[in-house]
Image (cartoon, rainbow, N blue to C red):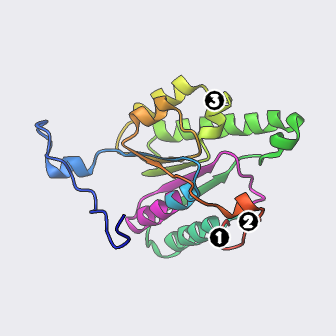
Amino acid sequence: MDPNATTPPPTSAGLPDDGLTTRERRLRPALIVNTGEGKGKTTAAMGLALRAWHQGWSIGVFQFIKSGRWVSGERIALETLGAEHQRTGAGGEVCWFATGAGRRWVQDPDAEPAQVDAARNAWQEVKQRLAAQRHRLYVLDEFTYPVNRGWLDLAEVVETLRDRPGVQHLVVTGRAAPPELTEIATTVTEMTKRKHPFDTGQKGQAGIEW
């Protein structure tokens, strides 16, 4: 393979004969899924949230696994931008919900009920906000895990996300996104791992992992 070769950027296919105008196409709700074994799923979602803030959108971030005790750089940055919106009106509102209980259930099965309850409570909050059209962008971080572990009903999740009212965009992150979810998504990105420091015993690094 030529190391200097470049892949051309994606281009839109020919427009379908559905009668929609360009403006109508730009207002269609997006459901974006970042999945796969590779690094960067949450990072990409938070980058999208920065774009949304710049557009003046209301943003709701729901972390389904991470607990509130784990404070990331993305959270600090986005909540700072949310405070700037409250102070000056610049950008958009930011609401952050770190409702998870962490990954304690991996080592301690007795901790799983707390995580199940936390995930179900967070999902109920998402459902209510979608019904009320509370935000323009929702980030459902690590959402595939409670779905795949059976803590949330997959059929209900698909129906709720597919039939949400208005122009509400969602980005879902997590490994092994179920086919039922990717089928209704407008964009699916598979993060493929080719190499990762964790494979050789490296620990997470400040500024890289959080």
Indicate the amino acid at tag 3. Answer: Leu
Q: In terms of secondary structure, where does tag 1 sit?
A: loop
Q: Is 202 rendered above or below residue 162?
A: below
Local packing at callout 1 (Cα closer than 10 Å; few below 14, some 14-19, many 20+) is few
- Kindly identify which residue carries mark 2: 204
Relative to 46, 113 lies left or right: right
Contact, mark 3 vs mark 1 (Cβ under 8 Å): no
Taking the spot 20% from the left edge, 47% from the top edge, the residue there is 24
Q: Is 10 rendered above or below residue 180?
A: below
- Residue bounds of the magenta highlight: 45-70
Residue sitting nearer the eye, 181 or 115:
181
Local packing at callout 2 (Cα closer than 10 Å; few below 14, some 14-19, many 20+) is few
Contact, mark 2 vs mark 3 (Cβ under 8 Å): no
Label drawn at residue 152: 3
Mark 3 or 1: in front is 1
The quadrant of the picture occupied by the C terminus is bottom right
- Kindly identify which residue carries mark 1: 208
Q: Is residue 164 visible?
A: no
Contact, mark 2 vs mark 1 (Cβ under 8 Å): yes
Q: Is residue 150 visible?
A: yes
Q: In terms of secondary structure, where does tag 3 sit?
A: loop
For the image, the number of numbered tags is: 3
Q: Is 141 in the magenta?
A: no
Taking the spot 34% from the left edge, 44% from the top edge, the residue there is 29
Indicate the amino acid at tag 1. Answer: Ile
The quadrant in which residue 196 appears is bottom right
Taking the spot 82% from the left edge, 40% from the top edge, the residue there is 105
Q: Position of residue 3 (x, y in %)?
A: 38, 71
Indicate the amino acid at tag 2. Answer: Gly
